[in-house]
Amino acid sequence: MDEPQTLILKVNGQEYKLRPDSRTTVLDALREQIGLTGTKKGCDHGQCGACTVHLEGERVLSCLLLVEGLAGREITTIEGIADPAGELHPMQQAFIDHDAFQCGYCTPGQIMSAIACVKEGHAGSRMEIQEFMSGNLCRCAAYPNIIEAIEAVRAAVLDPANSIQ
Amino acid sequence: MSFTESALKLFHLGEGPPDRSKRFAAIGRDLPRVDGRAKVTGTATYAAEWPVENLVHGAVIDSEIARGTVRSIDDSVALAAPGVLAVVTHENAPRLASYPKKGAGFPLTGEGGLGEVRQPLQDPTIYYGAQSIAVIVAETSEQARFAANLVKVEYDVQPPELDMDAASWTTRPTEFSGGEALQRGDESVEKALEGAPVRLEREYENPIYHHNPIEILASIACWEQRGGKDRLLLYDTTRSVDMLRDVVCHSFGLPLDCVHIVSKFIGGAFGSKAWTYHNPLLVALAAKVAGRPLRLEWRRQQVWSIGGHRPAQRHRLRIGAEPDGHMRALHHWTRQHSSMISGYTEYGSRMTKMMYAVPELGFTNELAHLNLPSPSVMRGPGFLTGGWALETALDELASELSIDPIELRLRNYAEIDPDTGLPFSNKHLRDCYDRGKERFGWDARHAKPSTQRIGRDLVGYGMASAMHPAAQQEASATVTLHADGTATARSATHELGNGSYTVFRQIAADGVALPIERVTFDLGDTTFPKAPPTHGSITTATVGPAVLDAATDAIAKLKDLASKDRASPLHGAKAERIEARAGRLHLFGDPATGEDYGTILRRAGVQEVTGKADVKPGLERMRYAFYSFGAVFAEVRVDSDTGVVRVARLCGVYDCGRLINPRTARSQLMGGMIFGLGAALTEETIFDPVNGLPVTRNLADYHVPACADTPDITIEVLNIPDPHIGELGAHGVGEMGTNGVPPAIGNAIFNATGHRLRSLPYTPDKLIKAYRHG
Ligand code: FES
Ligand code: FES
């Protein structure tokens, strides 16, 4: 048998060496090996959106993504969108301002999805936001406030005087 | 009270007049959550996320049958798999004491009790499908999950009992959870029903519902030997650290101080995640066998069996009324299932027994024991489903008698509690109807069904009353004033989205007269002062007074220090002459004569002073009936071809005492309303009627509301402090929003289509069937 190779995963600009196991998902790697537990597990099979991260800037479900084969590709998690001790990302701030969560468990996934939703140009109207945010379940049902938070950030993006990255 | 007068007392959330109570600066304010930053940055630590050295991982094997026994378990291949450390089954698990009979005064066992009586991994009997029968412990979670597939289990199978009507073991439990009567009624109810000029008899049924919080059950169990004793540190998703500790100590035969349970953030519960299930015990057992700290995150597929659910129920409502709509007699019969190892009874008539002024009231609650998993409380237990049946029956009566549904409810308005004969502590339901009528635009409703159309959609308006008890339990808290001018409050309550960190910090801040930024509140730890489970919407009204009293006690101790200190400007002053304001004690009416808290403490040579409080509901509970009320309105669009129902608008007006924080309260009510929408339209758990295994085992087959299902929501809260529930005047709001939504939607569907659906959820197949058969 070949010696298993070490797996490498690049998260938030940093490379992590992982146990060689071809079954390891990005979600479990983050939570169980790297210690970045901001990304949540709600179903482990692609139905709830709690595990949403960005792969090269696009939203993906980390529970459906195996670490193997991601060499050299960039994952961004909730811990990587802003300095946790410093200024928040505008979407994080909007979620606080609009009380867009209760228990907070779906929240990192909602925020990662929401940032992508605005970037994709899928936040044009309430209806569009509702449609393109429906992959992220919130059992506390903070939806009306999530929609408001995203609308507020989108409005800020559209206002050039107020632009965000 | 005239309408103008009552309208003056009302205001929309967040735009109300300032609280007149001098003492309350933070209480009642619309403040953002203090744990918001932790939640949006992913730094809030949930149970499965604690960093623990030397951790191993577990995976649980479920039974593939619903009734019978495990004949043999062959774990040889699994044990030889890479990384596997142990396979824990009923054959090698340490023995546990039998399940405790009581927990914090609640009966856990017996008919009407709350718990699942079976202890995990103690015997080979299978009582329901997907029952936990073994735990694989391995170095990594991948290895544990893989090895779980390598265990071969053989069974002696028996045919499961799965039909509520054909059950061989049925009972009529006398009490729900050791308190409320589950049976009432005699000849006189029957006579009054028979003699009534108008009679209505209807049957309704609701399916099994599952809580499905997004965070799945999880525990990390860490054993150690210290001082010659076994000690357990348990991180768990529980919303009842103290009760769970009682159960763990009893089960493992450990003294209270040897078990430490921590639950800082809970990813939603809605009635699950209590102390009543075996999951934490099973993890602790397996960790003991493994001899290493064990982390076990359950799978979403497994919560359909091991985390409780709202049982399926059938309701029969019988109403006897006058032609003008006055009800003379009302009887509510309910039958539901429980498991073979639980006496949990969903109390269907909890709303019926107290909602309307009916002289002759009766109810029956029957239990059928089946080979299904054990049910449990779920948001609005009994109120959501039984209340749905009642409020639908009322709508049927209104339509039969051609009376406006609100008018019918007003004609039967209860001025005193029909259940106990006591006056209500703070009931303003009339105002809820009035405000709801106006905010929703009820007058635009067409009384005649099926007369409003937009394209293919039939449009309908419906309403329902809602209620929830404003219960209280015993709780304790401490508040410590520090010499640096800050304060720390503590109580072993929980944060599961209810805003505990925020509202108790607000209460503590006002209690010690400090700005909220200088105060912290901590929770979720069995080493803190005791608090009850976070259930029954009791938390604000239970822990709030404890925090307030502990703060008051801390200030009293500080006054004492100052008054006894010759060097203090307050030397010799009586406590009642001293006022606490903005971090200083000074003489009433003389702010210049005083000093700040830190100065008093430092001169006394202490770093801090701690106030304590143990509170319990008092005699006022004997004098008043404590309830919250609400009026809920729905506008639906029903596709006249496909039968698909969309809720366009929901409007709820609630009367639930003083709001400590209008923002978090509004969110809870709003979330509750959408939770109710899921119960009304899409949620339904199915167990295979032949083999008893769960069929809906994921979030695609069991559809909880998604963002796209969100209607336009209007919420208004009267915000009238309850004068009889202590200084805070607050009720809890956790479950209030859920109740009333399914009947409001169902009644709107009738108004839209002329078809009365009597079974939840209102799925398109039921409407299509109704369209076909008229
Ligand atoms: S955990 Fe990945 S979608 Fe649910
Ligand atoms: S905030 Fe609790 S699940 Fe979304």
Image (cartoon, coloured by chain):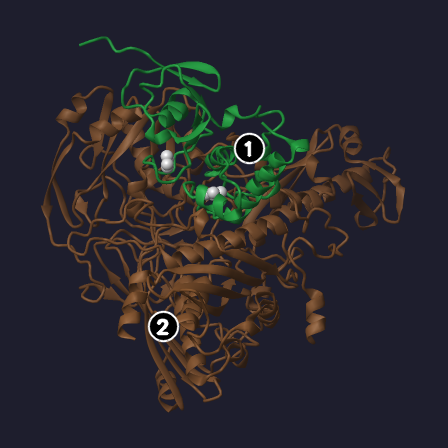
Residue B229 appears in the rendering = no
Q: Between B173 and B48, which is closer to the camera in this rendering? A: B48
* Residue B298 numbered mark, or none: none
What amino acid is labelled 1 in the image?
Ala
Q: Residue visible at 39% across and 48% down? A: B272
B406 lies above or below B235? below
Locate residue B20, reporting x and y percent.
Answer: 76, 57
- Are the residues under marks 1 and 2 on the same chain? yes
**SS label for mark 2:** loop
B502 lies above or below B183? above
- Residue highlighted by disc 2: B756
The picture quadrant where one finds residue B516 is top right
The picture quadrant where one finds residue B332 is bottom left
Q: Tags 1 and 2 in contact by the CB under 8 Å rule? A: no
Closest to the camera, between mark 1 and mark 2, is 2
Residue B405 appears in the rendering = yes
Mark 2 Cα within 10 Å, few/some/many (few <14, many 20+)? some
Q: Residue visible at 35% across and 31% down? A: A63
Say which label, 1 or 2, has the lower sequence index.
Answer: 1
**SS label for mark 1:** helix
Say whether residue B763 is left or right of residue B501.
left
Mark 1 Cα within 10 Å, few/some/many (few <14, many 20+)? some
Q: Quadrant of the N terminus of chain B?
A: bottom right
- Residue highlighted by disc 1: B38
Q: Which hue is chain B drawn in?
A: brown
Chain ID, mark 2 = B
What amino acid is labelled 2 in the image?
Arg
Locate residue B285, reporting x and y percent.
Answer: 30, 34
* Mark 2 vs ligand 2: CB below 8 Å: no
- Chain identifier matching the green colour in the rendered picture: A
Q: CA distance from mark 1 to mark 2?
A: 47 Å
Locate residue B317, reporting x and y percent.
Answer: 36, 75
